[in-house]
Amino acid sequence: MSFLVSPGVHVKEIDLTNVVPSVDTTIGALAGVFEKGPISKVVNITSEADLLKNFGKPNASNFEWWFTCSNFLKYSNTLRVVRAETGMLNAGEASGVLIQNDDVYFASYYSETGDGQVTSNDWYARSAGTHGNSLRLEVCPSATAYEQDLGVGNLVNGARAVGDTTVTVDDADASGFAFQVGDMIKFHTNDSVTATSNGAISTASINLTVDANSGTITTGMRVIAAGIDEVVTVKTVTSQTALILDKAITIADNVSMAFSAYAAVEAGDTQYEVTGISGEVLTIRLKDDADEGGIQTVIPDNSFITRRWRYADRFDAAPRTSAYNTQNSRGAGDEMHVVVLDGTGDITGFAAGVAGQRTSAIIETYANLSKNPSAKGPQGDSIYYPTVFFNQSDFVYWGDHISTGTNWGTDTTSAYTELKPITLVTFTGGTDDFAVTAGELELAYDKFADAETENVNLVMGGPSSGVTNTAAGQDTHVTMITSLVEGRKDCVAFVSPYRAATVGITNSTTQTENVTEAFELCPSSSYVVFDSGYKYMYDKYNDVYRFVPLNGDIAGLCANTDGVADPWFSPAGYNRGNVRGAISLSYNPTGGERDQLYRFRVNPVVNFPGQGVVLFGDKTALAKPSAFDRINVRRLFLVLEKAIATAAKFQLFEFNDEFTRAQFRNLVEPFLRDVQGRRGITDFKVVADGTNNTGEVIDRNEFIGDIYIKPARSINFITLNFIATRTGVDFSEVGG
């Protein structure tokens, strides 16, 4: 505060309530190979359903990584996953490319102007893999594409009988629109009133003047004429020659017009799907009829036809001009609808091209998106279609505007091009590659290297055989993970033996030799935990049984221990070491074999009859005798170091004097007493005074706090002495 000049009362606050904060201890981490999802990007996963949504299902090539994640999530709800980059490609509209993740897409593939900066692709699959080849996409870019009355040039040519699966039309290309496979059509009676336009409407208007007509025009009649492509009806009959329409139109003078009462030939909402086009002959089937049903009622000659987009029923109305564009006097006709489909059934199990599965194959719908990059919705959110897809779609990236779409991507007062055909997009070129190299896997694990940005505690190795199914391959795999955790020094890694060491080997002696040989090659570290093998479990997604590495479970047991006790408790034993979901083990070591494994710092996982599968060891991979050769001690110190270091940050840039040192001691000592009360340590001492903060230390702008800890030790060996004595002997004489 500034120096006082005149008398007065001045108030200030001094906060002495700082405490050592609690820290996360249950966050898992794994890098591996998956069938879909972002590449080289850390993704937070909270459940198996979340894992499934982001990274797809397990398969014969990646199930070890997938179930390592899934098994960990049986014990914890926080997991960080990185999909390693291999040789996979994203499917695209024209060809496959590699778009690793959203950051890469936005930097290199997204363009505000839609300038086609990468390829000619308008759309890409959101993630790399062959699953993207199943994607289909349809864009309904205008009201005309949504629904169209074709009663002038497209009349039924000849009566069609019940059961017919073809219909001939007078002109398949009339009204500026060609029928497309997938169109839905209805038939209507041709009992219309006819008239001709009286005076041209050069600027779109709802007011229409006609000459004398052949009958009585009534409210609700459809207006059908060359040049009117969308569905327009009579809203008000001022007189038989002066009409008000429900939509504005432009039309030349003296154009023949039909005003139809629009009576349906068939009762109800009978629609037919166009499945083939040959000249002016349409092949049709009853909508969504798996039996390929034909015409249900006789269709008279000269019946009107209404065509609709096959997914029109999924939307409330046709795309028109957005409220934003209307209110801000921007260009008309900016709205569009988009449907994303599973074309072949690889994603949903439903194929869009199969009768009866059309709607089931829909995986995303987007209504009333805008071609205007400035357009906003009622809540102020962007409704510009590339932005909406980037923010919301789980399956698709936008790449470029439709080439014929004039003004798309522009904030303009000019009308947006009214494209009539539905834009049909088929994705192709997506590829898989599950053969990961050591270098590719290491790059993926490197995404966890920065301890300041990525908070993880339990790093899982997944399959050590993911690189090479040998002891040497495991050495490479474990060395890269050890380098990660040794560099961070705030987390523990969990690894299993390479697959061939125990899976498919019937001789337990050979299994023991394989496991000990493999781990003898690996680095010594107190930040690494080895287990003894694989568990046998059910894969419900493929209806098979699989051997899966145990390291996901062992890391999960640590997370579970944090929930039921504290990180400084051992995760092993009958109280906290029960492995979930194991039918059996690839290697079930005997007592003598467990002794041998323990000498090599391997933690046995044992199937005890009647007691389940249990982690029966709590050693780290530290070779030298030390308190840090136990999991609970290592994790105790990780908690203490992280929590106290976090609290100590607030001493930075303060003075190194007795006041600051006292603050530090008063911060740390209550925290350690709490840990002591929760059985984590037996005793401690905090030194932060002039003895370790000497003048030389102060002059170097440093602060030193020495924290002495006596960690609690877990019981690994129990000796029970049963002593028989003579009758009449006082126990104090023999027992002390």
Image (cartoon, helix red, strand yellow):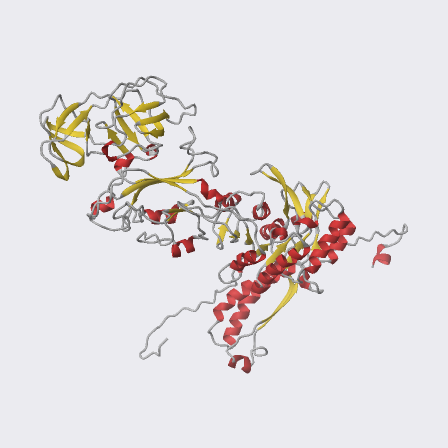
Vertical comparison of 22 with 387: above or below: below
Residue at 40% x, 32% y is 358
Left or right of residue 359: residue 521: right
Which quadrant is home to the C terminus?
A: bottom right
Q: Position of residue 173 (x, y in %)?
A: 26, 32
Residue 458 shows in this picture: yes
Q: Nearer the viewer, residue 118 or 286?
A: 118
Q: Residue at x 73, y 54 (%)?
A: 597
Judge whether residue 23 can be spotted in this image: no
In this view of the protein, which residue sits in the foreground, 689 or 467? 467
Q: How far across and how far down the image is residue 281, in percent?
A: 32, 26
Residue depicted at 84% across the width and 55% down the height: 731
Q: Which residue of the protein is positioned furthest toward the front in this rendering? A: 279
Q: Say if 736 sits above or below 534 in the image.
A: below
Q: What is the x, y in percent for residue 102? A: 42, 53
Look at the picture and state if 502 lies above or below 638.
Answer: above
Q: Quadrant of residue 636?
A: bottom right
150 relative position to 43: left or right: left
Camera-side residue of 400 and 62: 400
The front one of 52 and 517 is 517
Q: Quadrant of the N terminus?
A: bottom left
Q: Position of residue 359 (x, y in %)?
A: 40, 32
